[in-house]
Image: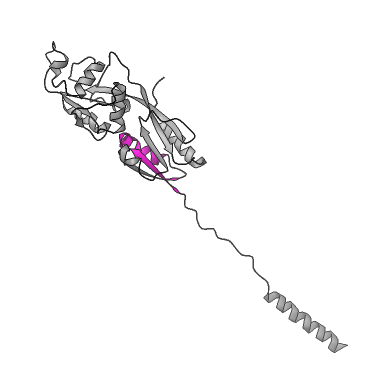
Amino acid sequence: MFFRRCGILFIALVLAAGCASEVIEPLVTVEAPTRPAVLQVGLSDSLSAFEPIFYECATDIGVLVETLPWRMLRNQPKDVFVVYGEGGKVLTEQVYQIGTSPLVMIVHPDNPVNAFSQNDLLRMYQGEITDWRDLSPLSSYGGEMAVWGYMPGSELQDAFAEEIFTANLQGAWNVAPDPAALVDQVAQDALAAGFVPVWAVTSSVRVVPLVDLTFEALPLLAIWEQMPDAAQQAWLVCVQSELPQAEE
């Protein structure tokens, strides 16, 4: 009996030891930190002044902005394009209007011209008027005009041509890379004139009224390649809140 009990006890101890050696500790899953996908933004160079906004609003997503002329930008692989003046676009679930702003004509503050007509603008940009006296024969203010615009085929130049009702505006004008640069040129030259979106106007230039036409508010559009997700939509709402909105 003693040996039987000892044998049973010995077997029990062996089994207990064997079971103890087979205990499997629970696995601890360590997740690698997720890296948010970077939103690739193509920004038209006419809107380059707003580039900081796109980064400031990126609190929950990564953003990388590339600024190029629209004619070059539209061929780039981007998640979203932000452009100005593409009024022919139909608003859909992938095309959002996030701002509006009209164009305005500007001159140097010393220039006394009090208004431009549609015909004035056509003749100025087609090179038919070269001196301020040709525009206002009775004015003592004269000198060779320095007419400023943008690269032919850019959305700003095309939008201006549509605003003055000509589909084929051809002539010789000085080319500015963007609205801010055009404002600087006009501010430095008393004989200069040009057009910019109203958001670009500073106190260094003067806006000239139009007498027989009105420049319509043009849209700022966000054109998505695919439907934006919730985080991207939140980013877009933030951007929209910081962009110019024309008064109704």
Left or right of residue 74, residue 231 in this image: right
Report x, y in % for residue 62: 43, 46
Q: Which residue appears at 35% of the width and 39% of the height?
A: 43
| In the image, residue 8 above or below residue 62 | below
Left or right of residue 3, residue 197 in this image: left
Q: Which residues are magenta?
A: 33-62
Q: Is residue 80 visible?
A: yes
**Which of the image's four quarters has the C terminus?**
top left
| In the image, residue 80 above or below residue 129 | below
Left or right of residue 132, residue 122 in this image: right
Report x, y in % for residue 195: 26, 25
Q: Which residue appears at 31% of the width and 22% of the height?
A: 163
Q: Is residue 108 visible?
A: no
Q: Is residue 49 magenta?
A: yes
**Which of the image's four quarters has the N terminus?**
bottom right
Report x, y in % for residue 85: 35, 29
Count of picture labels:
0
Q: Which residue appears at 28% of the width and 29% of the height?
A: 157
Q: Residue furthest right?
A: 1
Q: Residue furthest bottom?
A: 3
Which colour assignment does the render follow? one colour
Q: Residue furthest top?
A: 138
Left or right of residue 223, residue 198 in this image: left
| In the image, residue 31 above or below residue 215 | below
Q: Which residue appears at 49% of the width and 42% of the height?
A: 231
Q: Is residue 188 magenta?
A: no
**The quarter of the displayed image where residue 177 is located:** top left
**The quarter of the displayed image where residue 61 is located:** top left
Nearer to the camera, 155 or 103: 155
Report x, y in % for residue 182: 23, 30
Q: Residue furthest front?
A: 168
